[in-house]
């Protein structure tokens, strides 16, 4: 959500790079304008990398949705048992994401993870959260990342 008109063009560029080219408009004044309007809005919880690591180690029943590109996964590895669906493909493959347990979205830095979480929320998923910092934070914190076949 852009706060001003000068932020719209860079936001549109980023969305197009992520595969989103059907952009309906902007919210003049940004999210704050919506918040003070009294209209309904929703929030997406954020999960710290330490909590995500604990959940994986404790084998909690949740879906970790990795929305990075295939090449990124090959280069950096992945969390054990993460479901991989590239963000640009998520709208067409949303039914592959289980609805019966919480979903935590994950990407390279957290930017695509929040977009993926928004797509899931719009698709009717209620237990959705994103991992702030995602792989960048994991590399800094020493998460249990496993290598994938590198070709």
Image (cartoon, rainbow, N blue to C red):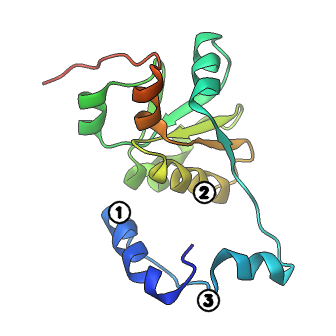
Q: Say which residue appears at 38% left-offset and 55% top-offset.
A: 88
Estimate the x, y position of residue 75 in percent, counting from the top left.
23, 30
Estimate the x, y position of residue 66 in percent, counting from the top left.
45, 36
Q: Quadrant of residue 56?
A: top right
Q: Which residue is mark 2?
A: 118
When asked about the image quadrant of residue 130, the answer is top right
Q: Of the residues under marks 3 and 2, which one precedes in the sequence?
A: 3
Disc 1 crowd, CA 10 A, few/some/many (<14, 14-19, 20+): few
Label 1: which residue?
19
Please, which residue is most extreme toward the right here? Answer: 38
Relative height, residue 81 to residue 103 (above, below): above
* Dot placed on the residue nearer the N-terminal end, 3 or 1: 1
Q: Quadrant of residue 67?
A: top left
The answer to whether the residues at label 1 and label 2 have Cβ atoms under 8 Å apart is no
The percent coordinates of residue 34 (x first, y second) are 74, 79
Label 2 sits on a secondary structure element that is helix
Name the secondary structure under disc 1.
loop
Q: CA distance from mark 3 to mark 2?
A: 20 Å
Q: Earlier in the sequence, mark 1 or mark 2?
A: 1
x, y percent for residue 128 = 67, 44
């Amino acid at each position: 959500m852009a706060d001003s008109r000068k932020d719209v063009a860079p936001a549109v560029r980023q969305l197009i790079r992520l595969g989103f080219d059907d952009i309906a408009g902007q919210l003049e004044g940004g999210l704050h304008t919506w918040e003070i309007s009294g209209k309904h809005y929703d929030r997406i919880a954020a999960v710290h990398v330490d909590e995500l690591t604990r959940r994986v180690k404790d084998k909690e029943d949740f879906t970790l949705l990795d929305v990075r590109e295939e090449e990124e996964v090959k280069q950096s590895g992945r969390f054990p048992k993460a479901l991989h669906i590239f963000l640009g493909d998520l709208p067409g493959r949303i039914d592959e994401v289980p609805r019966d347990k919480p979903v935590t979205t994950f990407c390279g830095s957290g930017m695509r993870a929040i977009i993926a979480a928004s797509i899931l929320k719009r698709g009717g998923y209620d237990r959705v959260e994103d991992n702030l910092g995602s792989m960048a934070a994991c590399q800094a914190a020493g998460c249990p990342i496993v290598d994938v076949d590198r070709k």
